[in-house]
Image: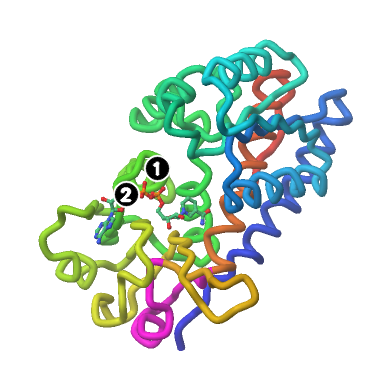
Amino acid sequence: MTRIIDGNEVADGITAALEDSIEELKSAGVTPSLATVLMSDDGASETYVSMKQRTCEELGIDGIHHQLDASAPAEELFDVVDELNADPDVNGILVQMPVPDHVDNAAVLRRIEPMKDVDGFHPENVGRLVAGDPRFKPCTPHGVQKLLEAADVETEGAEAVVVGRSDIVGKPMANLLIQKAPGGNATTTVCHSRTKDLAEKTREADIVIAAAGYPELIDGSMIGEGAVVIDVGVNRVEADTEKGYKLVGDVDFESAKPVAGAITPVPGGVGPMTIAMLMYNTVKAASIQSGVDVELP
Ligand code: NAD
């Protein structure tokens, strides 16, 4: 029987444990806070930011939101980031990506104070991750690592294939999997748009992590018998629904499920984990900045 890995359940476990850490911080006079910045009128980005803010509220984390016009000059965004960097009441800063084309994405990431960089995308935090001394692990790959752990999937010695090499998912995912650390020690292959025979690689894998942003790219014929399949993809495809679309992953769930040993659904798999790990990083940021040590799940 294929196991369905329930991301909502695992994420709820993590946020419940974080509530204890937040209580501990509060009893020492520290209330963790997260500032989100959105410079876009894209509906999906608005939804992601409001979900993040809602979770802050549920957990008792102070949420601050800055909304900028998508056509505002880049300097306006940099000014907001500078202000938040300097504000001692702000522990974490998240600029929702993507920013508009006229704003230099890399410059935004470099502008955020590394100690408040709860997305873990600042070059200093990327470097620490690669060096095996992570401060803030990027939320989505960290969430995948926690899902694998919760599902008792052994990464040590496993053949892992990551499909996608983006800075926010694929690369940090591969970096976590190769670390000589719990949740790592996997023999890791990274596939991307120039990979010659994707199916040949994925079929050999004990663990397939799909993060290509291409609807149902990986079907059952590309999965080895009993493999663990983690679907990071969230793709809108046209459908006869009220909204005119539905969300599908990068994995063709129906054909992959009978072959896989365990699989995550979309939605309800990696998505909730990303938000839980953002809360984790925010609590960690508050702990580091205040010097109040708390246990993290
Ligand atoms: P991206 O577009 O930046 O990167 C996609 C990567 O996939 C690229 O490196 C590209 O080389 C590779 N790729 C594209 N087509 C391919 C193909 N046919 N074969 C092999 N490789 C291919 O995307 P991203 O930001 O890394 O996101 C990937 C997916 O994950 C998207 O669907 C995104 O919406 C989703 N996502 C989900 C969460 C979550 O919390 N669930 C978080 C971040 C991203």
> Furthest-left residue in view?
196
The reply to whether the magenta stretch includes residue 262 is yes
Q: Are marks 2 and 1 in contact (CB under 8 Å)?
A: yes
Residue sitting at x 34%, y 48%: 170
User: In x, y percent, where is residue 171?
Assistant: 33, 42
What residue sits right under mark 2 in the picture? Answer: 185
Q: CA distance from mark 2 to mark 1?
A: 7 Å
User: In x, y percent, where is residue 124?
Assistant: 42, 21
Q: Is label 2 in a helix, a strand or a loop?
A: loop
Q: Main secondary structure of the magenta part?
A: loop
Horizontally, is 275 left or right of 174 in the view? right
User: In x, y percent, where is residue 247?
Assistant: 52, 69
What residue sits right under mark 1 in the picture? Answer: 181
Structural crowding at the residue carrying mark 2, measured as other residues with C-alpha within 10 Å and reported as few (<14), some (14–19) or many (≥20): some
The amino acid at mark 2 is Asn
The amino acid at mark 1 is Ala
Residue sitting at x 49%, y 32%: 120
